[in-house]
Image (spheres, rainbow, N blue to C red):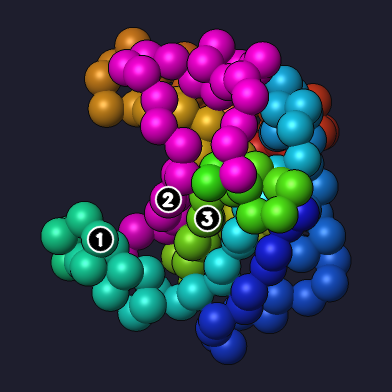
């Protein structure tokens, strides 16, 4: 289940955008071999709110594009399909019958700014940021260069399979 909560008014979050991003989330989970029913929350915010959340949660008082709040723990350099593929989850991991993966907080305002900076569509930028964030919920990281290379490659593979390219 994907819960979408639009907490901003600066950028229109129409049905078409929401549908696209839900499709991106579902496809990313499938590509990453998440075979359990799960829950992801997708929150749309503006730059002021993401700055505040970034400051409160990470001590960084600046605007960012997307924040990820995973609910599962991962061993260093391990991702969902390596740790949890055949795992028996407890009720404390679930909301009803669904595994709670975590929250994605996306600044639609920053996504629009970046789409202009990178000269591609807003939909492509928002999709990229959602894939990026879902991969974080699944244990991927980019703090070290080798991990960054793996994560960037995976992001592009997923977007290409969805036919969401930089030309879009």
Residue for point 46% across, 77% down: 46
Farthest-out residue, bottom: 9
Residues at badges 1 and 2 in contact (C-beta under 8 Å)? yes
- Give the magenta part as a residue range: 63-91
Quote the CA–CA distance across marks 1 and 2.
10 Å
Residue 28: image quadrant is top right
Question: Which label's residue is closer to the chain start, 1 or 2?
Answer: 1
Residue for point 69% across, 64% down: 3
Farthest-out residue, front: 91
Q: Is residue 24 above or below residue 4?
A: above
Residues at badges 2 and 3 in contact (C-beta under 8 Å)? yes
Q: Is residue 168 above or below residue 151?
A: below
Q: Nearer the viewer, residue 96 or 63?
A: 96
- Write down the residue under mark 1: 57
Task: Report x, y in % for residue 82.
Answer: 55, 12
Q: Is residue 75 visible?
A: yes
Mark 1 secondary-structure assignment: helix
Residue for point 58% across, 36% down: 90
Task: Report x, y in % for residue 56.
Answer: 22, 68
Magenta stretch holds residue 149: no
How many neighbours does mark 2 have within 10 angstroms: few (below 14), some (14-19), or many (20 or more)? some
Left or right: 50 as drawn, with respect to 32: left
Q: Quadrant of the N terminus?
A: bottom right
Residue for point 65% across, 38% down: 166
Q: Is residue 140 above or below residue 131?
A: above
Mark 2 secondary-structure assignment: strand
Q: Nearer the viewer, residue 110 or 121?
A: 110
Which label was assigned to residue 104?
Answer: 3
Task: Report x, y in % for residue 147.
Answer: 37, 17
Quote the CA–CA distance across marks 3 and 1.
13 Å
Which label was assigned to residue 69?
Answer: 2
């Amino acid at each position: 289940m994907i819960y979408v909560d639009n907490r901003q008014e600066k950028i229109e979050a129409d049905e078409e955008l929401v549908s696209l991003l839900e499709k991106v989330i579902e496809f990313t989970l499938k590509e990453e071999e998440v075979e359990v029913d799960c829950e992801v929350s997708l929150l749309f915010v503006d730059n002021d709110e993401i700055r505040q959340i970034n400051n409160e949660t990470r001590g960084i008082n600046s605007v960012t594009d997307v924040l990820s709040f995973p609910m599962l723990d991962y061993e260093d350099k391990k991702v969902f399909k390596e740790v949890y593929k055949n795992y028996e989850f407890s009720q404390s991991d679930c909301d009803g019958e669904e595994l709670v993966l975590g929250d994605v907080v996306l600044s639609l305002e920053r996504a629009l700014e970046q789409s202009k900076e990178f000269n591609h569509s807003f939909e492509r930028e928002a999709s990229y940021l959602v894939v990026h964030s879902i991969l974080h919920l699944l244990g991927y990281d980019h703090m070290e260069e080798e991990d960054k290379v793996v994560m960037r490659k995976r992001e592009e593979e997923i977007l290409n399979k969805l036919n969401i390219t930089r030309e879009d």
